[in-house]
Image: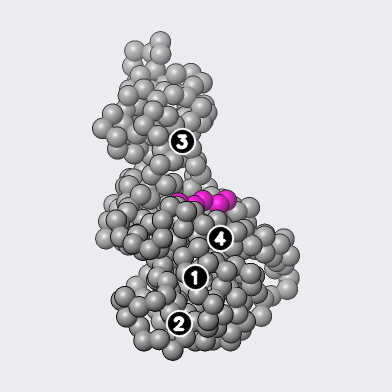
Amino acid sequence: MFIRNLWYVAAWEHEISADGLFSRTIIDIPIVFYRDDAGRVVALEDRCCHRHAPLSRGRKEGSCVRCGYHGLKFDASGRCVEIPGTPGIPRVARVRAFPTVVHHRWVVVWMGETSPDHSSLPDNFSCDHPDWKYLPGYLRYDTPYPLIVDNLLDFSHLSYVHAQTLGGSEEIARIHPKVDPIEGGVRVERTVPSVPMPNYYAPLWEYSGLIDRWISYEFRLPATLLMASGARPAGAAASADGEGVLFHSCQALTPETPNSTHYFFMEAHRADSGDASTTAGLFDGLLAAFEEDRKMITAQAGNVSSATPMVALPMDKALVLFRRITEERLRAEQPTTTRVDPV
C-alpha cells in the first residue's frame, strides 16, 4: 500500500518539545517522538512490546520513555532497559526505532527496513534560510493521499476552486504546463501571461494592472512539492530587482492511514519584502485557499466509485506520470519468490 524505503515528513520541528511526548501515525504505524538529553529527536513505535499500550500515554525520563501501563522503560534505540519487579530483561523486549533527522525544520523519518538514503532528503531549503520568511502550516485530511497528490499535480483547478484566492483567472486552466520526468518524480512548469492579479498577492504587492505569472515545481516521492513561483507586470522583462512577487513553497503529504493524510505546507516570500503582518496576511490567504482544496477533495472522496472509472484528460499528464512512478517503486519493494517446479 505504501512505499517504505523513503523519508516521510512527520512533524514541524517546533511540534516536538524538549520535555514531552508527541505521537503521530505515519503510513499506518503509530510513532512516538521525543527529544533525548542532547536534544536529538527520537522516534519509536508507539506500541509497547508487552501489552501494546501506546508509549505516548507514558512519560519521558531523560533519553528514555516509560510505558504508562506496566512501567517498562525503553531507551532511544528501542531496547527495554527496565521492567519493574523483574530482574532479567528478555532480549525480545524492545520496540522498533526509526531513523529520524531534523531537516530544515522538518522532522523526517525513514520508514523502511533498509539503511536510510540521506541523499534523497528533500531540498526544502527555504524552510530554514534567512532570505525567506513564512509561517508553518499543517492540515489533516480524512481522505486518501493520492487524491491530494492529484490536486497538487494539476494546477488548472486554481481557476475554479481558488477563483477568489490563489487563482483569479480562468486562463490558468487554458494553459497546459510543460511536464517532464525527473529522478523519483516529475517537474511541472506553467507560464500564464496577461492575467489579473489574484487576491492572494494583495498583502505583498499593491498593483492593479495585468500580470505575467509563472509556476515551476518538482514533485518527488513520496509526495513532496518544492515550488518557485512569482509574477511581474505583464510584458515586463524578468530581472532580479524588477517589480513583482517571488515565492518559494515547500509542501509534503504524508499518509496517516489508507484513508487519512497529514499535509505540511509553507509558502515563503523574500525576507526583504514586507514585514511580519505581510507574512501573516499571506499565511491567512494560503490557509483559506487550502481549506478550499480540502472541502473539494473531501467531497470528491465521498463520491469516488470503483464501479465508475475516472475519465483521463490532457490536463492529467503530470498526475498520470507520477502515479506510474509510484506504482513502479511499490512493485520494486515487493518481495520476489522463486518458482520451484516439482521433481
Mark toward the viewer: 4 or 2: 2
Task: Specify start and end residues of the magenta stretch as a single range.
Answer: 136-140
What kind of element bears circle 1? loop
From the viewer's perspective, tell me whether residue 273 is left or right of residue 299.
left
User: Marks 4 and 2, how far apart in space?
Assistant: 21 Å
Residue 139 drawn in magenta: yes
Dominant secondary structure, magenta? strand
Q: Which residue type does callout 2 highlight?
A: Pro
**Mark 4 or mark 3, which is nearer the start of the sequence?**
3
Residue 138 versus residue 244: which sits nearer the camera?
Answer: 244
Residue 234 versus residue 291: which sits nearer the camera?
Answer: 234
Residue topped by disc 1: 206
Residue topped by disc 2: 233
**Mark 1 or mark 4, which is nearer the start of the sequence?**
1
Would residue 79 be seen by someone viewing this image from the given angle? no
The percent position of residue 327, horizontal first and vertical second, equals: 48, 69
The percent position of residue 200, horizontal first and vertical second, equals: 54, 66
**Mark 2 or mark 4, which is nearer the start of the sequence?**
2
Residue topped by disc 3: 22
User: Marks 1 and 2, how far apart in space?
Assistant: 11 Å
From the viewer's perspective, tell me whether residue 233 is left or right of residue 121.
right
Q: Residue at x 35, y 19 (%)?
A: 82
What kind of element bears circle 3? strand
Q: Compared with residue 198, is residue 97 higher up or lower down, i.e. above or below?
A: above
Residue 212 drawn in magenta: no
Query: Which picture quadrant has residue 67?
Result: top left
- Which label belongs to residue 285? 4
From the viewer's perspective, tell me whether residue 32 is left or right of residue 99.
right
- Which label belongs to residue 13? none
